Every structure is written in structure tokens, then in C-alpha cells.
Amino acid sequence: MRRAHLLYLSLIAAITLLAGCGPAAGPSDVDLSERQIRVVTTIGMITDVVQIVGGERVAVTGLMGSGVDPHLYKASEGDVRRLAEADLIFYNGLHLEAQMGEVLEQMDGRGIKTRAVTEGIERDDLLQPEDFEGHYDPHVWFDVTLWTQAVETVRDTLAEIDPGSAGTYRANAAAYLEELEALHTYVQEQTGRIPDEQRVLITAHDAFNYFGRAYGFEVRGLQGISTEAEAGTGDVQALAGFIAERRIPAIFIESSVPERNVEAVQAAVQAQGFEVAIGGELFSDAMGDEGTEEGTYVGMVRHNVDTIVGALLQE
């Protein structure tokens, strides 16, 4: 048995022990109307949604902050306690959180309610890359229309465990969904400025395939869907050849992935006689710093789109 799997078996046992073994009362057996609901989330995009939809009814703890790669994240002792003390845990699912996600799925019904925000998305709407071991691509937030379904899952789950505040959750979600509709329109308008032949997005790893499908981009990543996959010299050279042949003006680094991989591609392109710029930093698996515009889902998407459009149009 792999060491990582043993560690996560230990994690689920620790959470169960701290939450209380045996027939522990789940959220449906607890009156939450007299206090805030303790919610733990994994990635920042989910934290943002829960804070907006839940409003003052929730106290949210996000495990993964700015610059944290969820594919490689390992839960700390403090995280175990936070998970055990939660009334509700939201995670992305679709193998984004790797074995930690498997643990969270198993925790549902053991005194703690867990919910994958992607569970309401029709599987026919998900991408299933051949090189991701039979899993779906988890980066659904880059198609704003798919992410609205995650918002609806958060709304419905909060209303389920706290029915007395269901009206508040519905109202907050409705206002936010309008904001996301406007965001989707903004992305369409801005990306529509780029001629079709220039719509090629190259980043550190394959996080932007939903973005590409939704907004008409050819997408290439040096690493695969998960950053657990290492890029070799052959991968660098193949991508460099593609860039030089297509004369792509810019490639992009990601905030949660080391810059050196993309810089290696840039150097390999230069060795083939073509100059490609690093067009800027995109937020992929993590948002920006808390308190900044990029530390919100809407601000993150707008930043990414503005950076992509500006670099590819060489504005």
C-alpha cells in the first residue's frame, strides 16, 4: 500500500475520532439557527462562493490560500482539527484535491456533512482528458457558466442544513448569479477582440481547457491536468516547436506553479530562433491574496482575461 494512501487512512481516522466516534449527530440533528454555521472549504474559489451566499450566517475557514497548489496539498494537524470541528465541508471534487478529496467524500455521514460543489454538474458537460487516468478535468471554474452550478449547489446545501435561513441564501445567490452572468458577458466581449488565429493559450499546466472550450481558445499546457505530472525535456522541446511554428506572441506563468518550467519553454523557443514573451501571471488553481481584487473569483477571472487579451494582442 502506498505511503500516501496510509497517511490519508490515518487522516480519516483522526477526523472521525475528533468528531466523535459512533452515532455522532450530523448537521440535520443540530439546531444551527442560534449560531453561525462552521464551514470549512478547500480552494479559494469555493471559499469566496460560500462567504457570498452564506453571508453573516456562516463562519468560513479556507484551507488553501493564495499560491497553494491543491493537487499537491497535504493536510496539516491544524487542518484535521478544523475539518473535525466543522458543521459542513465544501470541496471541489473531480480529483482536484487528490486523496484528500477521497477522504472528504468518505467523511460524509460520519458526523460531518461534506459536499463536492461540482456534484450537480452534468457529467456530459465535463471534460475527460485521455491523460488524466480516467478522471474528469476538475478546473470547471474557468467556464463561468459551469461555476454558476457550483453556486447553486452551495445555496441548496446551506438551505438544506439551515432551512430557517433558506430565503437569505436564495437572495444572496440570486444577486451573485446576476454578477456572474455579467462576468460571462465580459469574458465573451474581451476574448472576442482576439482574431481566431491568435486564440492560443499556453500555460504551465492544463488548467484552462474549460476556458478554451467556452470562449474559443486552443489551449496547451506544459504539464498535464494535475501538477503531480512532471514535464520532461521532450515536453519542453515539443511545446517550444509548436510555439515557434505558430509564432505565438506570449505564454503565461501561473501563480501556484513554479515559473521555471515556463521560463525553460521560453528559452527553448529562443533557441529555435523565435522570441516569445511571458505575457504575465494567471491565477489557475488558486486566487490572489485575500483583500485584493484578484482574491475574489470575479476579480481573478477579470484579471486573467485582461492579461490574456492584452498579451496576445500585444497591447
Image: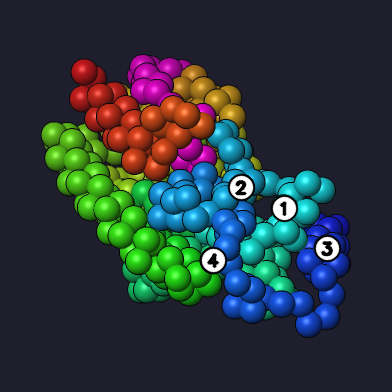
Q: Nearer the viewer, residue 135 or 51?
A: 51
Mark 4 closeness class: few <14, some 14–19, many ≥20 residues within 10 Å: few
Q: Which label is found at residue 82?
A: 1
Disc 1 to disc 2, C-alpha distance: 8 Å
The structure residue drawn at horizontal position 35% and vertical position 66%, both measured from the top left corner, is: 167
Q: Which label is found at residue 33?
A: 4
Q: Which label is found at residue 118?
A: none
| Image location of residue 195, percent across then percent down | 14, 36
**First along the sequence among labels 2 and 3:** 3
**Is disc 1 in contact with disc 2, using a CB cutoff of under 8 Å?**
yes
Query: Which amino acid, by three-letter code, is at mark 1?
Result: Arg
| Residue hosting label 3 | 18
Mark 3 closeness class: few <14, some 14–19, many ≥20 residues within 10 Å: some
Query: Which amino acid, by three-letter code, is at mark 3?
Result: Leu
The structure residue drawn at horizontal position 77% and vertical position 54%, both measured from the top left corner, is: 80
Query: Which amino acid, by three-letter code, is at mark 2?
Result: Thr
Q: Which label is found at residue 61?
A: 2
**Which SS class for mark 3?**
helix
Disc 2 to disc 3, C-alpha distance: 18 Å
Left or right, 239 with respect to 97, comes to: left
Left or right, 238 with respect to 277, comes to: right
